Amino acid sequence: MSSSTNLMINLLVLLALASLPSPAPALCYIHAGEAGSVVRTPNGTPPPPADAYRTYIVLVDPPPHGAATDDDGHRRWHESFLPGGRRMDDGADQARIIRSYTEVFEGFAARLTAAELAGVVSKKPGFVRAFPGRRTLRLMTTHTPEFLGLTRGAGFWRDVAGYGKGVVVGLLDTGVHAAHPSFDDRGVPPPPARWRGSCAVAATRRCNNKLVGVKSFVDGGGGGGDDDVGHGTHTASTAAGNFVAGGASDRGLGAGTAAGIAPGAHVAMYKVCNGSGCDDDAVLAGFDEAMKDGVDVLSVSLGRWSSPPFDEDPIAIAAFSAVARGITVVCAAGNGGPEPSTVSNDAPWLLTVAAGSVDRSFSTTVLLGNGELVDGQALAQQPNSSTSYYPLLFSEKQPKCNELAGIVGDGVAGHLVVCQSDPVEDESVVSAMMATGAGGVVLINTESEGYTTVLEDYGPGMVQVTVAGGHNITEYARSSSSSAGGCKPNATVVFDNTLLSVHPAPTVASFSSRGPSKVAPGVLKPDVLAPGLNILAAWPPHLQHGGGGGGGGLFKVISGTSMATPHASGVAALVKSRHPDWSPAAIKSTILTTSDAVDGAGNPILDEHHERATAFLTGAGHINPARAADPGLVYDIAVADYAGYICALLGDAGLGTIVRNESLSCGKLDKNKIPEAQLNYPTITVPLPRSSSSAAPPPFTVNRTVTNVGPARSTYTMKLEIPRSLTMRVSPEKLVFSGVGEKKGFSVTVSGGGGGGEVVEGSLSWVSGKHVVRSPIVAVPQPYLKLGS
């Protein structure tokens, strides 16, 4: 195969989420003391009538001293905020309180009117804040462990990380198909004694040592935690599915032994979503229960189209409480790419995961009549029983599939149709073309997708090609046509099954959301890149596999940052198993500082257009589990440090909403307020002040502290990789440690820049023998980035 062909195949491996729902409004919040001006609706939408019932999430102070603090006591305290009785007076006789929360924060979800909230609830002493509950959260592998350097048998995966044994990975998702072989407990010991979870599965297969907890917070909990969507089964098996040997595949594609990243870890599923989406009150209930049960890692493949401020974001608020309890929370960056500043779940206490490709292609070749080969991919592959050439059908005036179908109608019969992708209408249009007798459909990526081929299952006969591949086909069709209506150009399709070791890989998927964060641009987000494109993992066999036919398959290929998130969650579980006493910040630090800044061939990681990806796409780089268990140094962050950061960013109101710790206040933390640039984060974002004169802008200094978790006696020497436009000074240039747990501080002073106001990137590494502790440095000119100094 030619190098250009191989190159194209590698690019095709990039994932994208297929059918993204239309954008939902952002959350609107009501602050304490603002009840008189309650209405703050997004996008100019009119508020509901004051007497209309809706779900509100209400944050309150803890019960007063001396009150009962068991579950009933908390509920009575919450009910004391209600106007009138416990039930609604609208004739439906529904209970007002839907859920009570005690772990993520003190509060409840209740059915209230806006008038009741403003006139009664918000006036009661102990009221903190309220916001409307919305359904704005969206659901955002046989080969990926091997791609990440994890191989079964002797070595790091088994002997160092223990396959993640002793760790409980919780997931907030759509439930789980408990009977799937990925959740068999063969070789998995009982959960740790501290585990307090329980099972509520309606299926005949119950929980075991692998699947140790299942609970549902949708539809009244009816049906248990069974997965009627497939998303939760897929993510759970990716994070911690057991080994499934012998032919795990999606209809023969990607065949091999399936395993999650932490196959020895335990799984707990909290069903907070269904096919319609995810309600805030259910997501918060899932967080609350996971904290009570005692999970170690929480994988959250959910997100919004835009991020609200942290004190108005239920996931950020709930996750802070989880992190304060020692739980590592891993979240999807979102599927809003390739537009900039679309990253969600961007709070610094979260591990935010972007999506990239793997080195596997479900290869299909379009053989043109002139002998040229165009590489593509297809999920529903057919036996190559015929090499018949079909005349090509392509329209320059109506290039999109739905446009072409509208003017051609039955004329597609006997042709190989070539058209441009339109994700909203592709499935129905392609199905109609094939039903009308088309010899096949070649679907060309959109310009924004570039080389990222988001594999869709619209049934046999469909091939997907990149923008570059589509250009080659349409140029051939153009040059070969003897007249405007001629159909002399022809082609055939050859199905090649599964190819491995394709390059370049990884690359950033076009749909993966990018930074900088709009909420907190001074902290680099996303944090890391993980496999999220065309990921093969467990699937409920009763659910349909798409246009290729009904159910029956145990594995399915899907894409999204939802798929990248459990890969990183699995790595967090491996690290937690090796280092059970490490904090969530230390675990995140080791994942970031040991990640790869280059692809499998040692070249810079590329984006969907095969251009060099910036740190706003990749974060610190691509996850590398084999290095993560032994980082040498970590950048740790205490809860009080996060509190100081929140004070600097949001003030007392934000601290009171997020931290909910009476011993912490911005007044007490006044000397310890931490601007964004100074948070002890493993990545470094430097705001370069702009000078009012022609003189160079003044330098900017950031401070960091590292903790030795490697050999007791060790010396680290700094290594800088910076462009010529930057001047950087690190002090001291060496860090000498004499004990494990010892901390050392250093400063980085940056000056210069691109001159044209562009973002400039470099890196700082601390090197000691086999340990390379790498931090990307992103220098951003103001006012592009407004940060505290």
Image (cartoon, helix red, strand yellow):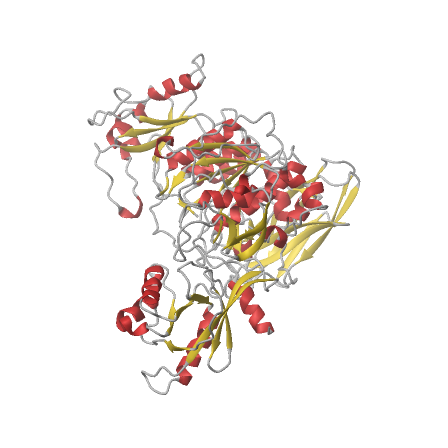
- Tell me the residue at 38%/20% (across/down): 75
Whether residue 346 is visible: no
Q: Quadrant of the N terminus?
A: bottom right
Considering every residue shown, the one lying at the far top of the view is 66
Which residue is painted at 67% across and 50% down in the image?
151
In this rendering, is residue 121 above or below 231?
above
Left-right relation of 542 to 715 = left
Query: Which quadrant of the view contains residue 574?
Result: top right
Q: Is residue 279 left or right of residue 595?
A: left
424 lies left or right of 495: left
Is residue 609 shown above or below 415?
above
Q: Position of residue 635 (x, y in %)?
A: 64, 41
Where residue 355 appears, as percent x and y from the top left, is 51, 53
Where's residue 682, x and y in %? Answer: 61, 46
Q: In the figure, residue 230 lies in which quadrant? A: top left
Of 769 and 438, which appears nearest the observer?
A: 438
Q: Position of residue 308 (x, y in %)?
A: 41, 43
Residue 409 seen: yes
